[in-house]
Structures are given as structure tokens and as C-alpha cells.
Amino acid sequence: MPEPTKKEENEVPAPAPAPAPPPGEPSKEKEAGTTPAKGEAGTTPAKEPSKEKEAGTTPAKGEAGTTPAKEPSKEKKPGTAPAKEWSVGEPPAGEEQDKQNANSQLSTLFVEKPQSGEVKVGENITFIAKVKAEDLLRKPTIKWFKGKWMDLASKAGKHLQLKETFERHSRVYTFEMQIIKAKENYAGNYRCEVTYKDKFDSCSFDLEVHESTGTTPNIDIRSAGITDLRGMLKRLKRMRRVEKKSAAFSKILDPAYQVDKGGRVRFAVELADPKLEVKWYKNGQEIRPSTKYIFEHKGCERIMFINNCGLTDDSEYYVTAGDEKCSTELFVREPPVMVTKQLEDTKAYCGERVELECEVSEDDANVKWFKNGEEIIPGPKSRYRIKVDGKKHILIIEGATKADTAEYSVMTTGGQSSAKLSVDLKPLKILTPLTDQTVNLGKEICLKCEISENISGKWTKNSLPVQETDRLKIIHKGRIHKLVIANALTEDEGDYVFAPDAYSVTLPAKVHVIDPPRINLDGLGPDNTVTVIAGNKLRLEIPISGEPPPKVIWSRADKAIMEGSGRIRAESYPDSSTLVIDVAERDDSGVYNISLKNEAGEAHASIKVKVVDIPDPPVAPNVKEVGDDWCIMTWDPPLYDGGSPILGYFIERKKKQSSRWMRLNFDLCKETTFEPKKMIEGVAYEVRIFAVNAVGISKPSMPSRPFVPLAVTSPPTLLAVDSVTDTTVTMKWRPPDQIGAAGLDGYVLEYCYEGSDNWLPAHKDLIDKTKFTITDLPTDAKIFVRVKAVNAAGASEPKYYSQPILVKQIIEPPKIRIPRHLKQTYIRRVGEAINLVIPFQGKPKPELTWKKDGKEIDKNQINIRNSETDSIIFIRKAERSHSGKYDLEVKVEKFMETASIDIQVVDRPGPPQVVKIDDVWGENVALSWTPPKDDGNAAITGYTIQKADKKSMEWFTVIEHYHRTSATISELVIGNEYYFRVFSENMCGLSEDATMTKESAVIAKDGKIYKNPVYEDFDFTEAPMFTQPLVNTYAVAGYNATLNCSVRGNPKPKITWMKNKVTIKDDPRYRMFSNQGVCTLEIRKPSPYDGGTYCCKAVNDLGTVEIECKLEVKGGLSFCRLLLQGVPPNIIDSYLRDLQSSNPEEY
């Protein structure tokens, strides 16, 4: 970045131009990427004092002939002659003043600049720069330099740290550079540069490092003003150096090397140990092998070649081997540059682009341009641009004006050339008019127009003159006129007009200011994560901005979160939007999205909400091992840790019969195993676990299975008689109240006869169930029964039944318990399933009998399942024939109980029988009809009447839910002819068909009588006829088979299927379908016995027709496999018959 010049922006150069500098005057500087010519006669250029390498040296203070001079190319003050030559070691007059002037220019970004300082060797020092951020929409870019070119960002580390902070209240960025344990070579000139868009500010400061007593200062030959590099190198080689013997290097680098630009240089060292790793560095940066840098290994010698040396290779180099290094300096000499193609005189018009071109002897050489003897320094605000294309150098003047008429010259280190430029006026044309603009709030408004002449003009806003301010700038650059408003505000809206001076032309434009929505997430944690404890209320307020105010949408997983009173809701305010979660729950964790939208744009952001909670309770612990007064318990971590890592566990213990838990550890147990001690033998214990995380303690786990130090269990409980027969007694009981740590292995059931003390076991092995039947007992005998619980410690005390048990069947009279909803008529629609459960009681197992309307139930249509406690009647698809009274009879020996259930299966009714038009008068028609023959097994609840115009025959409902059988239809259209139809309705709905009037009703106009024409009715009747016959079919046993044919007839014929001349009726193995005249008979999983002659019979009033086919059912897998393989059925049949004759036993 170029340093600020000493001249103010609006300063006018003196009328008397200064003479051009002589060719021998130094004109190259490292700032622009060039190096002063070394070794040229009559020149003594020196690099600026601050130029150093990475660990660079600083000029020795007080040494004669080493004080550096200011850059010769620095711009001079107006009206002064070129700087006179001054001797080495004497600073130019006014150097300090120039530096102060450069730093005292009006600062556009800094509010506090770093100040020069001093520090002792080994101490720390911090430099601070502050930038005001009120008008900045984002963070500015800052760079720290040592000298003019060394960027310190890459040097940050042990001895250099760069920090930056931002204060939201004061809106100030603070940038710090801290030097840790300063060394002598850290001294020098430093520079801080800050950039934001087109704004730029810089500041220079010095660091002085006080030398320690008895130390020799390092000398930077690059800033000491030495020009005779060749002689210096010879003197350095003749100098006797006292070198410390190196353990890594047997031969080190020379103190300095010199090479011509474009040449090749060779660096070589020899290692004492060839196994050491060698690394080469330039200005502290490691050099990697490339086409420019070539490395060679020859025994102990390590060589680096640098090809095509340029001015950027003029640096300090060093090589490291192990913990040691040696360094050197490389000087690149540049030959003088000659002008090979001279400038030519040029004529141009005002506002045109002018190019002055010359050629020099070398590519990318440093060339200076002068206007009337004053150097031209291009910059961001300058109309002059310099273009370099190899050896060509072009001076470009954008939008030339009459002020550009002058003599222009170009100067190199070896020559110069000059030419005259003449600029004249030309007719004014509008090349680029102003355009209407819509600008975001805070952004820059730039109204730009271009005219054919380089003349000034005036700007107005809403017919009022526009005045320049710190925020509003009027720019006139050649033919281009700009009105630039930084940080656009809403009041900047309006109508702007530019009027060129001396012309009547005006250029208007309208400006509209908007502000895209923005979301401020600065207050959130890393990764925009918000953490809330479960049960608490989360109120997440997100600052937003935008003009016009944006529409805010919160969402989660593509589901919008609405504003309102929900537990999770959004709240909107003028400058913020709030996400509210009342009583946060675990499931509320996730990513929440906020979207803003207005006419200026959209903004989106994602916020991760993390609900942390106490962990879930662990699973009940498992007691793996038990001793006399101790146990070993283990457990698994909880399935959910509450969103925070488990820190440890608390363990509690209690006696099984107690409700008081005792804490066993006061320090968190980090493991998932624990050993409680000091328990009482024979006492049942339970243990439980608490998990602990950063939020708190979980709920307790379920207690472990009770355990005791080894002891027998308590006796079983609640021993009772379950049932008794003439030869058996069934007993049941409950497990013992206390089961020790040894667990429960099983039970022993014993009995003895009354009057005897001999207890007999009822079984051989232990039983693990709490119910057992004692068999083979004599009838009318009395027995006593007891039961014991057995574990590893032995059998428990027996549990006795309190009285003797008589071995004799107990009769319990039957009793039917009809459910309440079956005490009334049970109604179901046709096609629905009927599943009724009727519970009953009685011992021994009662006999059940079902009847329908006093007759036995056909089990092929109605399924009945009986158990010891209930009876179930099931009908898969109810039909109207299933309606009726069902009687259940339950009988136990001589006792009997009966109950009845009324089942009504209803369907939609048929249509009314006849619909007649009784009378027609005016706009009215009187209708009457008779109720339907078929009421669907339910009362008719009403009728629906529809009408249709004869022309369109579109039906419209006139009356619904009508209860009478006659009605009057009104408001008919005169001149139209109507038909009417009526639907019946019951609890199942409307009838499928409707009955229509045979004649129509004509609503005649007054005074005219219309006589309906008489048409003879067409006879559509037809005797039944098969259009597709049945075909002989082969079927495979176990696979469904179908027979198909199609029939036509009017009236619709009735279809009857027969097998071997026997009608198929109510057989669940057959299903018959008829749809649009296609008749289908499906035979479910036929067997060979289902083969035969099948006949389909169609009958109507006009006749009867039959058609037959043969069905042959082949059994076995072989037939199916052969048929699927495409073998003809007759061949399969012949093959199977041969197979059957050869093996008759298998078939």
C-alpha cells in the first residue's frame, strides 16, 4: 500500500514546474516492488531505515556513513526545487518535519494511533490502535508492518502477538501488537494500516531497544547506504572473522552474495553429519523445492540454486541443520534501463481517453512520468493511470481536460523522452445519463453521469442545491460527474438533478433507500448455541433490523412457529424478534430457523437450542454376588444423560420392608460397580442408583431385586382351593413375602389324609408355578394340604390350608350374564361383522345350545365358539337372513339357564313402487307414490324427491327427508317439461334406485294448450342369451379355480349355477359373482372331488338358457409344475395315469 504523500488532495501545483531530475538520481524503491540500482556511478541510494528481514538487523546507531536517507522518490512540496544531494550520514533537511506532516494528516479511520516507544532488551511492549465503527457495517482490515514491506501477520508467535477486541457500547475496535522479550534487532520503524472499502488510513511509529552493556550492535547493510557492493564483498572476504566452531556445519555460507538480475546464484554448505536434516529459509519463510529453487545433495555438501533472480530475491537467507543455523545476504543488481521508443506528440478532445506510450529496454522496469517537470503519482483519486505491458509503458489520462494540455516526459535510470499533449473542447453530448437507483440503507449511493466534455456542473435535490458534507461527496473526474452519499439514510430519498455549467441540459434521477433485513447473533455462544435447563422458560431475543420492517418467520423442521399463546411461540417487536418456550422440555432441543424478508431482500439464520436436564434414572441395579453381610452390585449408565456428561453416581440402600433409604457414598462414584457392606444377615435389602450431571441429580432408579444374606425364604402365602373334582384337587397360592438373596428355586406341595400324619408329595420335581392339581385321589376322601418354598438355603416353613378338603365335585348352577348393550335389539348393517361375547358361569363345565327362532343354527353360516366362561357368536358378513331371535341355553346337570338376543340386520330400502303425477296447475305439480315393497328390514324414515328438465335430464333435489307419500312441487318454470323421481330412505340411507314418473308434467303458458305427441314405447325385452360360453378347464388341487361366461337379456336374467345337475346354494366353498353381464363361479381350493360338469343357467320372463363345461382337478405338485412348464394337459394326464398304474399304493 503506498504511503500517504505530503501534498494535500486539493493542493494546486506551483506554476513554475521544477526541473526534471537528472538521469543519475535514484528513482527506484522497494515499496513499489523495485530495488535501487546498486553500484551505479554517481548515485548513493539507501533503503529506508525500517526495512528488515524476518529476524532482520537494524542500522547501527551512531556509526558514521550508515545513517539511512529518506526515499528519493518522495513527493516534493509544491513550489520547491528538487532535493539537493546530501552526503551519507547526514539526514536531509526537513526529514523529521515530513514524517510529522505525513502522520498529522486528517485521519479518516483511526481514533487512537500507536505511539513510538522504547524498551529494554528482554522486556515487553504493546502498541495500541483504535478504530471507530459507527459508520462501518463490518470489521475493518488492519495490517502491521515493519519498515515498508514486512507484513508482521506471518511472524506472530512466541515473540509477537496480535490481538483485536470490539466494545459494543462504544462501538470501537481495539487492535494490539505486543512484542515479547524484545531483542536489539527489533528496533526500527513500524507502520499500521487500516482499510475499509475505499477508506484507508495509516500511521508510522518507531521502536527503540536499549542495548545491553558490552554487546555489539547488529548492522543491516541493506539500510546502511552502501552502494559499492562488489568492493564491500571483497573487504568482507578479507576480514578475519573469529567464528565459533559449529557442531553441525563444517563449512558455512559466505557473508554475502551478489548476482545480476535474471542470473543464477549458488548457496552451498557442508555438514559435519550427513544425516542431519537441512532447511532453507528466506526472510523467515521456509523455501520449498520448485523450478526456481533447486536443491542438491553431494555427500556432506548441501546446495541450493536460485534461478532467474529478480529484485524480490534481494533478501536475507539462512539454513538450519538441527538446532544451528547460518545466514547470508543476497544482493541483486539491476542494469540501467534505456528508452527504446520515444513519446509522440498527441492531440485530443476534452473528455477523451489519452494514452502516451513508450518502450524501454527491460520488462517491468521502474519508469517515472512527469507533467511539466512534476512527477505524476497515480492513486485511487487520480485521473492518471500507468499501464505496464512488458517493455511497453503507457500513461492513461481518463477524461482529458484543457488542464491536461502540457509537456509530458518519461524517465528511466538510463534515459528519458518527452512529448506534448494538446486538449481542445468539443460539442457536449450526454454519454451516460443518470439512472434511478434503489439503494440499501447504510450502503453507498452513487449517482453517476458522463458527458462528452470535461466541464463542471451543479447538483440539486428536490430543486434545492446539494451541499458537500462529510457524508456527501461531489466528484468531478473528467467527463464523469458523481454524487456519492456514504451510509445512505432514509432522508436521502428524493429527485436529484445534475446541470452542466454553460449548458441548458439537465440529467434527472430518483433515489429510493431501502434496508435489507439483518439478524444480529453477536450475543449467542459458539455455533449459535443456546442452552436452557428443562423446566425453565427460554426467552431468546434476537435483534433485527430492516427497512421496511421485515416479516419474521420462526420455524423448526420445516414447521412454522406461530405467534400466539402456545407453549412455543414467537413474539415480534420493532427492533427484535423473540422465541419463547414456556417450561422447556427435552424434545424442544434442535435447530430453530429465523427468516426475515422485505422488499430489500432476505436474511436467514439457524440457532441451536439445547435443553439440558437431569439425566434419566439408571436401569435397576443388578446384585451379582452376595455374602453374609455384603454384596456386589453393577448397573448400566442411563439411556439419556440429560444433554450433559454423567459426573458420577450416588447409591442408596434400604431394608425391603422399610421406606427409609440410606445414602452409602458421599463422594461421587465414578464407576458402574459398588460394594455395600455392614448388612444384617437374613434381612432383605434393596439398592437403587442416582445419576449426577452438571444440572443435578436424576430420579432414583427402580430398586434392585430384593436380596438377603443366604437364608431360606418365608412361607408361601394365600394358600387356597382353586377347584375340586371327584378325583382331583387344584390348589393355588402366592409367593413368599420374603425371598432371600438365594432366590426362589420352586415349591413343594404335600398332602395327607385326615387322621394320618404321613405327608405325601404331590409331585416328583420342584414346581415353579403357584398352582398345581393333585390327581388320583379317592372320591369322598378328606385331605390336608401344605406348600413349602425352596431355595439354595433349603425349604421354608410350610404353609397349611386351614381345614380338610373333601374330594367331591362341587356343582355351581349356571348363570348367563347378558351384556347391557345386548338387552335391546342389536342392529347391524348388511356386510358388517357380528361378534358377540356372552359370558356365563357354572360348574362343572356346562352344556350350551344355540337356537335361532326356535330352530338349530346353521354352523356353515354362523360360527359359534364356546369356552368354559363364555360363548361367542360370529358372523363374518351379516345378511338380512341373519336377523331374528337367538336363544342360548346353558345346562349343568339338572340346572338350566336361558337367555335371548334379538339381532336385526338392516339394509338400504328399495325404491317406491309407483310415482304418479296427480295434477298440474300453474307452476305446481302434485305427486303421489306408494311405499316400497322392501323397507330394508328397517322403518322408512322419509323420501327424497328430485326433478329433471326433459331437455337436459339433469336431476336436482327438490325435497329431502319428506315423510308423507304425496307432495306438491312449486316454483317450476313455465314452458318447461319435467320428470320426477323419488328415493326411499331408512336408517341405512337412500335407496340405490329411484322410481321415476312414466309421464312428464308440462308447465303450460296461460292461454295456450300444448298437446304432447304420442310415441309408441319401444320394446327392449329380450330372452337370455350367452354371448361368451363356458370352456372346459383344468384346475390344480389346492389352488382357486374360476369359471367365466357372459349373458345378455332384458329383464335382467336370474343366474343359477349347478354341479352335476345339482344347484349350488349356500356352500362356503363356492363364490358367485355377476357384474355387467359377466358371470363368475369361484371354487376355493378345489380337490379332485370337485371335478365334474358345471352348468350356468339364466332365466327371465321370456325364456331359459343353459351352458355347460367340464372341470377336471389334478392333484399333486407334479401336475402343477408340469403345467407351469408349458406341457399340454392331455400329455400331463396320460403321464400321471401311467405313473399311477406303476405305483398304485402311492396314489
Image (cartoon, helix red, strand yellow):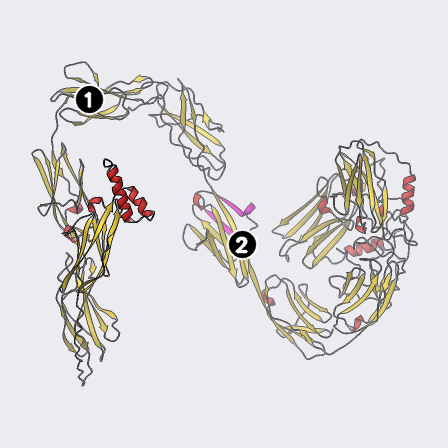
Q: Quadrant of residue 896?
A: top left
Residue 1085 visible somewhere in the drawing = no
Residue 293 vs 348, above or below: the answer is above
Residue in the image at 74% along x and 35% along y: 277
Q: Position of residue 421 (x, y in %)?
A: 82, 71
Q: Position of residue 867 (x, y in %)?
A: 18, 37
Residue 1017 vs 697, above or below: the answer is below
Q: Is residue 626 magenta?
A: no
Q: Position of residue 239 (x, y in %)?
A: 91, 38
Residue 1104 visible somewhere in the drawing = yes
Residue 644 vs 606, above or below: the answer is above
Give the crowd class for mark 1: few <14, some 14-19, many >=20 residues within 10 Å. Answer: some
Q: Position of residue 1011 (x, y in %)?
A: 17, 82
Please give left or right for residue 323 compared with residue 954 in the image: right
Q: Which residues are magenta?
A: 520-542
Give the crowd class for mark 2: few <14, some 14-19, many >=20 residues within 10 Å. Answer: some
Q: Which residue is mark 2?
A: 543
Question: Furthest residue to the bottom?
Answer: 1007
Residue 487 vs 626, above or below: the answer is below
| Figure quadrant of the C terminus | top left
Q: Is residue 536 magenta?
A: yes
Task: Return the mark for residue 1126.
Answer: none
- Nearer-the-camera pick, 581 or 339: 339
Q: Amino acid at mark 2?
A: Pro
Q: Amino acid at mark 1?
A: Tyr
Q: Which residue is mark 1?
A: 801
| Figure quadrant of the N terminus | bottom right
Please report contact status of discs 2 and 1: CB closer than 8 Å, yes or no: no
Q: Which dot, 2 or 1, sits closer to the camera? A: 1
Please give left or right for residue 1032 compared with residue 534 in the image: left
SS at mark 1 in the image: loop
Task: Measure the C-alpha gap from mark 2 to mark 1.
Answer: 80 Å
